[in-house]
Image (tube, helix red, strand yellow):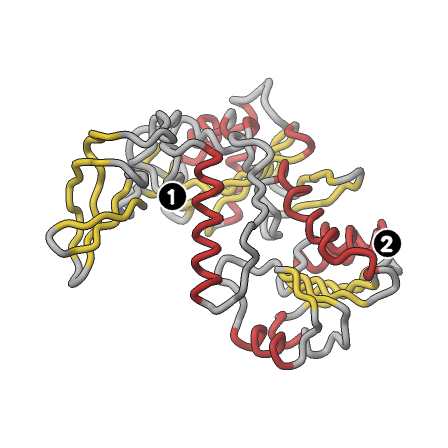
């Protein structure tokens, strides 16, 4: 959000950019700050662009489409720098920053809520719990958005026990994995009805699909984690390998929150002995199977909470951490500071 001041209050402004002069409508007031929506821009930032999505501003998903993409990257780098500065972490004067390899259609998985009006599937409103039905979403893979209407129509006849639908593109975009929530048994009927309406669309499945990375095939289930921005895997993973460098050969490395093992196998490619820790039993099993397929000697999979399994994994040259959105548990940060290795790649 943009940050301004009005009548002694700090005001957080949706839709405003640094350096702009705007008229805004106050939406919420707290003791020392307020929230507002921009309604008119009188002096524009040179980085302001027209949001390409017709749902921007109402949808609770994207928040920065009015800012040119490189400006978004710099803004996010600034947020990270401020967080680390407040935590007392010393930083170099210049931070290298890498944006996504593609700006649109990059998400290979999405979760869509049922909508009571308009298109049958969508996202929560930006300022309420109501669902905004969408006919398209510019950040999702075409296999997902091209099937949205058919899947939504198939879901619309179901009872209230189905509230969301998870869609995962796979097979290079030729497959679509469909999973209903919380009643997963409804996935089969949705599959049949949606497939009948998509004779030229992707092949629909409710069991599993596959993703490819650097010549390897990885199986993905509805309950197994995957990096949703598949085109940017190189930008995410390869700097980790470069950072750890030549020391990896023959050394023990712990890959915490390892998921289905994509990064674990890349670490093993450079000669590391990898302990992959994953708490989700489905993802851990897939990680083990992928290791057995591609590098059984290089990767050992441990199924269990990172909080308890880190201390049991033994001495390591480095720990690689890719935690869920909630971040690291206190037990993990305590172990890292008191007993952990010299090198941590987060």
Q: Secondary structure at mark 2?
A: loop
Which of the 4 image quadrants contains residue 121? top left
Residue extending furthest front?
Answer: 93
Q: Which of the two discs, 1 and 2, labels the residue nearer the N terminus?
A: 1
Crowding at mark 1 (Cα within 10 Å: few <14, some 14-19, many 20+)? few
Is residue 132 or residue 31 the one in the foreground?
A: 31
Residue 198 sits in which quadrant? top right
Residue that extends furthest to the bottom in the rendered view of this protein: 338
Disc nearest the viewer among 1 and 2: 2
Indicate left or right for 169 with 165 as reference: right
Query: Residue sitting at 63 percent across and 62 percent down?
Result: 321
Q: Is residue 87 left or right of residue 115?
A: right
Identify the image quadrant of residue 68. Answer: top left
The residue sitting at 74% across, 51% down in the picture is: 242
As measured in the structure, the alpha-carbon distance from the residue carrying label 1 to the one carrying label 2 is 45 Å
> Compared with residue 47, is residue 291 higher up or lower down, i.e. above or below?
below
Q: Which mark is residue 295?
A: 2
Residue 317 appears at what percent x and percent y?
77, 69
Percent across and percent down for residue 4 are 23, 48
Mark 1 touches mark 2? (CB < 8 Å): no
Q: Please tell me whether mark 1 sits on a helix, a strand or a loop.
A: loop
Give the residue furthest to the left.
Answer: 7
Task: Reply above or below: 131 against 138.
Answer: below
- Decide if residue 120 is in sight here: no
Q: Residue 186: x percent and y percent?
A: 50, 43
In what quadrant of the picture does the C terminus appear?
bottom right
- Give residue 320's mark: none
Residue at left offset 68%, top offset 31% = 172
Q: Residue furthest top?
A: 200
Residue located 51% across and 30% down the image: 104
Q: Which residue is mark 1?
A: 159
Give the answer, above or below, for where 291 lies relative to 135: below
């Amino acid at each position: 959000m943009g940050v301004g001041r009005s009548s002694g209050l700090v005001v957080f402004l949706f839709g405003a950019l640094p350096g702009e002069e705007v008229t805004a409508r106050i939406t919420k007031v707290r003791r020392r700050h307020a929230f507002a929506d921009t309604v008119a821009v009188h002096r524009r930032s040179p980085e302001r662009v027209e949001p390409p999505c017709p749902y921007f501003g109402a949808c609770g998903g994207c928040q920065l489409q009015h800012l040119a993409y490189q400006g978004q990257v710099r803004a996010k780098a600034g947020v990270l720098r401020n967080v680390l500065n407040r935590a007392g972490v010393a930083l170099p004067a210049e931070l290298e920053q890498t944006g996504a390899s593609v700006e649109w259609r990059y998400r290979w998985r999405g979760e869509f809520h049922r909508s009571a009006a308009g298109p049958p599937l969508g996202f929560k409103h930006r300022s309420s719990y109501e669902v905004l039905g969408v006919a398209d979403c510019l950040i999702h893979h075409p296999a997902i958005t091209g099937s949205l209407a058919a899947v939504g129509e198939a879901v619309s006849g179901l009872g209230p026990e189905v509230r969301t639908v998870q869609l995962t593109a796979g097979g290079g975009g030729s497959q679509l994995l469909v999973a209903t929530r919380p009643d997963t048994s409804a996935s089969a009927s949705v599959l049949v009805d949606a497939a009948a309406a998509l004779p030229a669309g992707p092949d629909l499945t409710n069991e599993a699909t596959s993703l490819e990375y650097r010549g390897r095939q990885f199986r993905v289930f509805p309950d197994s984690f995957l990096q949703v921005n598949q085109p940017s895997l190189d930008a995410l993973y390869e700097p980790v390998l470069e950072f750890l460098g030549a020391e990896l050969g023959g050394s023990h490395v712990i890959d915490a929150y390892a998921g289905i093992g994509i990064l674990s196998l890349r670490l093993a490619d450079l000669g590391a002995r990898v302990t992959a820790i994953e708490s989700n039993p489905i993802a851990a099993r897939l990680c083990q199977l992928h290791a057995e397929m591609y590098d059984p000697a290089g990767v050992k999979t441990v199924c269990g909470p990172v909080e308890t399994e880190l201390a049991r994994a033994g001495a390591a040259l480095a720990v690689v951490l890719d935690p869920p959105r909630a971040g690291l548990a206190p037990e993990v940060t305590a172990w890292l500071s008191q007993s952990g290795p010299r090198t941590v790649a987060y």
